[in-house]
Image: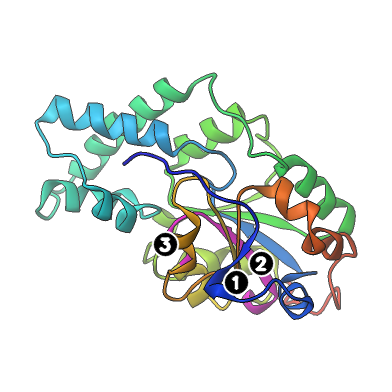
Amino acid sequence: MLPLPGAGLTPAGRHAYTASLVTELARPEAVVFDLDGTLVDNIPFHAAAFARFGERRGLRVFDRETGSRLMGRRNSDVFRELLGRPLEPGELGELEREKEALYREMSRGRLSPLPGLVELLDLLDASGIPAAIATSAPAPNVVHTLREIGLPDRFPCVVRSDEVPRGKPHPDVFLAAARAVGVEPERCLAFEDAPSGIAAARAAGMRCVAVATTLPRRELSDCDPPPQLVVADYRELLAGALGSALAAGPVGQGRGVRG
């Protein structure tokens, strides 16, 4: 699956970028980020790793529709679809180690945070808004990717889909991230780049901003349920009214569930 360019700050669902939309999204009590394709534009490296993995094993490569549907899901779901059968005991670990080692090898020294991400994290820190990660990536990839983009210690709270009963598009990983930071999901703002992740965040009750790093704006806007907003990157987010509103800090700090 090849990456497709995004196209700027755009309300999802064909709604106007209004003050009411800004109010709906702004000043959350916590922010929950996906990792791959959301903090970093690394999906092309995953696609290349899957292509080489498939060549080694004589497996078909996903078509675009299937790739889009599986984007953001955990490896147990992806490999089952790739092989077209249930996985044998112990098989997931073997397949995952091979493919993800290829990703780490291909991406080493070639990753950087999305434009505006560090500035957004600084703004959240200054406003007292905690940030967490809810990802389908396996643990070695989380460590690798955060280190490669220069943020190895920036997220004290990381929840992986392999730590919860169900992966995306189910809400489990986002609900677990909200619990970890002690904030009700309805008071969290999620950032995602994949349809399955958007569905998971919305199912958790979170408001969601989609980042058009890999899929085109219209495809993200047409998700069911859709994100509330689609942006090209965080630089565009911060340049708009929502960035100014986020700078004001969370509404009703301390109203989340703590402990």
On the image, the x and y values in percent for residue 239 come to: 79, 52
**Quarter placement of the N terminus:** top left
Residue position marked by numbered label 2 in the rendering: 189
Magenta part of the protein: which range?
185-198
> Which corner quadrant holds the C terminus?
bottom right
Amino acid type shown at disc 3: Pro
Q: Residue at x 36, y 52 (%)?
A: 71
Give the Cα distance between marks 2 and 3.
16 Å
- List the residue tagged with mark 3: 195
Q: Residues within 10 Å of mark 3 (few under 14, many from 20)?
A: many
On whether residue 80 falls in the magenta region, the answer is: no
Residues at circles 2 and 3 in contact by the CB criterion of under 8 Å: no
In 3D space, how far apart are the residues under numbered discs 2 and 1 (Cα atoms)? Answer: 10 Å
Closer to viewer: mark 2 or mark 1: 1
Q: Percent position (x, y) of residue 70?
A: 31, 55
Query: Vertically, is 85 above or below 250?
Result: above
Q: Earlier in the sequence, mark 2 or mark 3?
A: 2
State the SS at label 2: strand
Residues at marks 1 and 3, CA–CA distance in whole angstroms? 13 Å
